Image: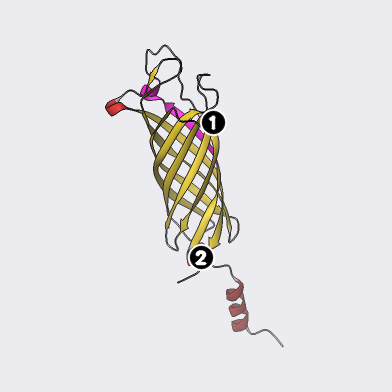
């Protein structure tokens, strides 16, 4: 006997993978990050005797967050990156702890664009120490490709400012000695992202 077209359609519907917007998710993963310092500002003041202590670098980040059924993702991230310091620091490490948010623009395809915003704290020093600390933020955009129901890869890029508290380095050079004792640097970031989604139970 021939298959009932209605039953076949029901079977196809039953085995179809629900779209990502059908569930709430715990979404977590890692990112390979490149941090480019476009302008070090008064962290490396003009006319300084010592060379610039805060240059570009790269590192690794980890993040975890909540992906809603709608368009929003909210979460946190920790990133550690090694930077060029003109040999003024033995091992220059920038650490960032950020609260992050994404807004996904399209839920209907495997490739989803999004806008992103972040704010958090930053520490900079030698060998995981903290010569200075302050605030950071980010404004960017990305693309996310859904490999399977539980795995996604993506790329994100954007602008990131840093606000460091003033300090004097080992060469005796005063750094970030600007408004209210803070100095600002301007940077850009590029991330290659791998994340996993775990569906959360519905209420």
Tell me the quarter of the picture where residue 119 sits.
top left
Q: Quadrant of the C terminus?
A: bottom left
Query: Residue at position x 48%, y 46% from top?
Result: 77
Marks counted in the figure total 2
In the rendered image, the vertical position of residue 4 relative to residue 20, given as above or below: below
Query: Outermost residue toward the left?
Result: 180
Q: Give the vertical position of 68 relative to 164 (above or below).
A: below
Question: Residue 24 location in percent, x, y?
Answer: 48, 64
Viewer-closest of 37 and 162: 162
Name which residue lies at 40% across and 42% down: 120
Instruction: Identify the colour scheme used.
Output: secondary structure
Give the answer, above or below, for where 148 lies relative to 80.
below
**Disc sitting over residue 200 in the figure:** 2
On screen, residue 139 versus residue 13, left or right, reads: left
Which class describes the residues within 10 Å of circle 2: few (<14), some (14-19), or many (20+)? Answer: some
Tell me where the magenta segment starts and ends, as one range.
32-46
Residues under labels 1 and 2: Cα distance? 36 Å
Q: Which of the pair 15/170 is nearer the observer? A: 170
Q: Which residue is mark 1?
A: 82
Residue occupying image coordinates x 52% and y 32%: 128
Question: Residue 56, percent across and down?
Answer: 50, 28
Residue 146 horizontal side relative to residue 96, left or right: right
Q: Which residue is drawn at the image coordinates 43% and 44% (left, top)? A: 98
Q: Position of residue 49 (x, y in %)?
A: 42, 11
């Amino acid at each position: 006997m021939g298959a009932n077209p209605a039953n076949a359609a029901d079977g196809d519907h039953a085995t179809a993978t629900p779209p990502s917007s059908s569930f709430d998710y715990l979404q977590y993963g890692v990112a390979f990050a490149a941090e480019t310092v476009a302008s070090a500002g008064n962290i490396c003041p003009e006319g300084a005797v010592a060379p610039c202590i805060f240059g570009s670098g790269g590192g690794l980040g980890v993040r975890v967050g909540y992906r809603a059924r709608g368009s929003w993702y909210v979460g946190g991230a920790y990133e550690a990156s090694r930077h060029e310091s003109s040999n003024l620091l033995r091992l220059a490490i920038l650490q960032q702890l950020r609260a992050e948010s994404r807004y996904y623009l399209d839920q209907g395809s495997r490739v989803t664009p999004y806008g992103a915003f972040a704010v958090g704290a930053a520490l900079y020093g030698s060998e995981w120490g903290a010569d200075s600390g302050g605030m950071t933020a980010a404004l960017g955009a990305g693309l996310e490709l859904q490999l399977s129901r539980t795995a996604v890869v993506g790329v994100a890029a954007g602008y990131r400012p840093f606000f460091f508290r003033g300090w004097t380095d080992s060469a005796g050079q005063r750094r970030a000695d600007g408004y209210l004792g803070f100095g600002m640097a301007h940077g850009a970031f590029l991330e290659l992202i791998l994340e996993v989604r775990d569906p959360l139970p519905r209420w």
